[in-house]
Image (cartoon, grey):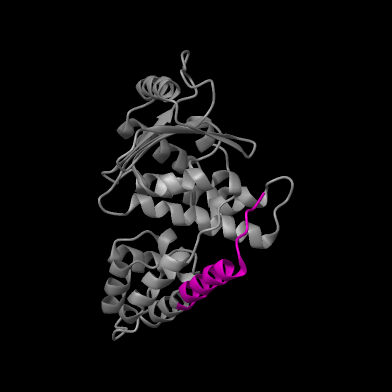
Amino acid sequence: MELTGPADDNDEVEDAADLFRVIGRQVRVLRERAGLTQRELGDQLGYSEDLIRSLERGRRTPQPEFLDAADELLGAGGLLRAATEDVGRAKARARVKHPAWFKDYARLERQAVEVHEYGNHVIPGLLQTEDHARSLFAMRKPLLDDATIEQRVIARLARQELLTRWPAPIVTCIIEESVLRRTIGGEAVHKAQLDKLLELGQLRSLELQVMPTKRDKHAGMGGPFILLTPQGRAQVAYLEVQNISRLITDPDEVRILAARYGSIRAQALTPSESLAVIQELLGEA
């Protein structure tokens, strides 16, 4: 179920999306004028090709530091830099549209100083590429309409700003090896997703671990969950299955899940071993 707000809220979301699309088109025109590919521009600015592609499509919020760097590199003469204030205002007004059952968690996640996630079915949303996320939403049953799919993709990508903000929160993710072998969206989308995981695995604030399939003991057989610590508040836990969610605040229940997460981390591969596995899978893709 999608929770919709008043018409003026929807207008603000659309206004922000329109602005981001215009800036994205400007970046694309300037990039092509400079004779650069998306990957080459990303390499020179210190961003991934996936992020540049998303920005040019208007799917990601252009951050001030990106606008400044791109303006200088592409010789925009202040065109991109001038949009910084407009982006800030649009971002403040716009409300990302999450499903109703996810809104409480999304609000807490924006305040998080720590996020720890165990995923045994899909790659965590914080780590997904745009195309991977779109593929997941497109295959939902019952089917989602195109507008809802795009809203969900934008909302998911917006959450990923958590990984690049400062001060950076502590983030750990444990992913089942079987999940990494599932070619969601096809081979090209899958390959790009593995590339992104390798890139994210280099972040100092993120520890990524793989739980190998060949394990005779596994503390996570009860299913996926997230542990989250909001700024200045006690740790909570979040469970989700079949679009049914539960936010757990009871200290004893949270403590049990935290202990379980510690066991899963101990049974998983180390971060360096995990990146080596992803690299190996990428070679097979």
Q: In the rendered image of this protein, does residue 242 appear above or below residue 151?
A: above
Magenta-colored stretch includes residue 270: no
Task: Answer with the quarter of the image where residue 212 lies.
Answer: top left
Would you place residue 160 above or below residue 230 in this image?
A: below
Q: Is 172 left or right of 168, judged from the image as shown?
A: right
Left or right placement of residue 189 versus residue 138 in this view: left
Q: Position of residue 138 (x, y in %)?
A: 66, 52
Tell me which residue sits at (28%, 43%) in the image: 205
Q: Position of residue 206 (x, y in %)?
A: 32, 41
Tell me what residue is drawn at x 58 percent, y 67 percent.
Answer: 10
Whether residue 184 is visible, yes or no, is no
Question: Would residue 17 be counted in the magenta stretch?
Answer: yes
Q: How many marks?
A: 0
Q: Is residue 158 visible?
A: yes
- Dominant SS of magenta comes to helix
For the view shown, which residue lies furthest in the bottom direction?
Answer: 77
